Amino acid sequence: MSTGGNGGQATDAAAQTIPLGTVITTTNWRQYQQFMPDGMVTLFEGQSLWKMPDDVAMTVGPTVIHPLPTGYLAATEKYGATTKLVELPDGGFTISGYQGGIPFPDPTEPHRGWKILADFWYRYMPHIVVNTPDNPGFNCTLDGYGNISCIKGLWVARQLSFNTDPGTPSSFPGAEGKYYTTWFMVEEPEQQRYSTTLTMEYTDLSRPEDVFIFVPSLRRTQRLSAAARCSSSGTEMTPDDGRFGFDGTIPDFSANLIGTRKILSEMDIKSAGAAFPDNYDMPLGWPKPSWGQWELRDSYVLDLRKLPAKAAGYCYGKRIIYVDQQFFGPLWLDLYDPKMQLWKVALLQPIVTNIPRIGPQNSSGAWYAHWWNLQNHHATFQGPKDGHGYNVLLNDNVPSNYLDIERYATPGGLSAVMR
């Protein structure tokens, strides 16, 4: 078994561990590479411009499991038997009968990989996540010469259907047919201020997402082509890399399970990357030791590829995604170009956050993400201004003005951006 580098060691890795308190450095990392995604190994090997800093220090702590929300698990038990995998004429898959929770709580063959992809797609998330103007999210790019460019902005992300949070309707009135929307408005720099993007996902998995942008200079909204899935807008992320790691039209992809592995991840971040680059280990932009301890997480290793009939012109040959087996969130990405050469790697860090009436969760809508483009010597970093995501507002803590579905979850609401 191989994901392109050290994947052949995965069979034995599941039975092994790393002693608590171990500090992984550039001197001893090879002893622990079986617990690293292939892209992390590449950074340690140091053959690219992007390589681990000499002073990197990753302290291994205990693995902490935060049970999934009671309502989400109740929906899993109630509706699991009604959720079915449906094969499409083009060789892809969709699901029918889904009403909430984990679609396939015990994914088995046949098509186990695609069932895990569905579990990833419908992983638990709070029904609303907001970065306020007092705590804007940041998106910073870094080139090989050390030049940095950042934007900051306001996020409003909403799950409109299949909700399981306490006191929340399964589907919000007025949002029929919509699953998830993300509204983002630039606040800095000034010359881009009020530029706003609305992304809309649908309950029909085969329906491509819609993307609308508000252009301040034109005072009007434009709809982007649903086929433009490889544009990057100057960052490492394409539209298919959105929504915390993968945002493609999943019936258009095959999903093969390469295997299961324990991999190093860091999620319970204390005082972390609130300031880029000051709080990062440069020049790579790796988390400093002050970010907290790393833990071993059981993960599924999925190989996602566009179906052959839809692959022409697509930017990625394959996407290797490491999915946490407990909360189904993404932990790491290895992205390959159409020639199957490693192109980009990404460390994804969902921040453990306390959700009102639910408690601490890994998949909370607050995260740090580090994307390195190995071929083009470019990188992108994302996160909330506050170091631990405490100022990311979730569910009951969200001010009422952000609950307006018309304003923050429909194209018509974009016309109110500059009012």
Image (tube, grey):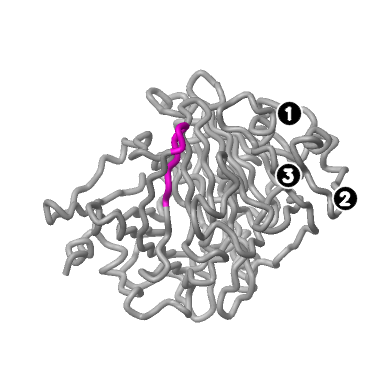
- Give the secondary structure at mark 2: loop
- Residue 7 visible somewhere in the drawing: yes
By secondary structure, the bulk of the magenta-drawn segment is best described as strand
Q: Residue at x 39, y 23 (%)?
A: 312
Whether residue 237 appears in magenta in the rendering, the answer is no
* Label 1 environment density (alpha carbons within 10 Å; few <14, some 14–19, many ≥20): some
Whether residue 143 appears in magenta in the rendering, the answer is yes
Q: Which residue is mark 3?
A: 263
Tell me the magenta residue range.
139-146
Q: CA distance from mark 2 to mark 3?
A: 14 Å
* Quadrant where the image shows the N terminus: top right
Q: Nearer the viewer, residue 118 or 153?
A: 153
Q: Which residue is mark 1?
A: 6
361 relative to 52, above or below:
below
- Give the secondary structure at mark 1: loop
Q: Earlier in the sequence, mark 1 or mark 2?
A: 1
Q: Nearer the viewer, residue 276 or 69?
A: 276
Q: CA distance from mark 1 to mark 2?
A: 21 Å
* Quadrant where the image shows the C terminus: bottom left
Quarter-of-image position of residue 137:
bottom left
Residue 27, horizontal then vertical, whole percent: 79, 35
The kind of residue on which mark 1 rests is: Asn
- Residue 116 visible somewhere in the drawing: no
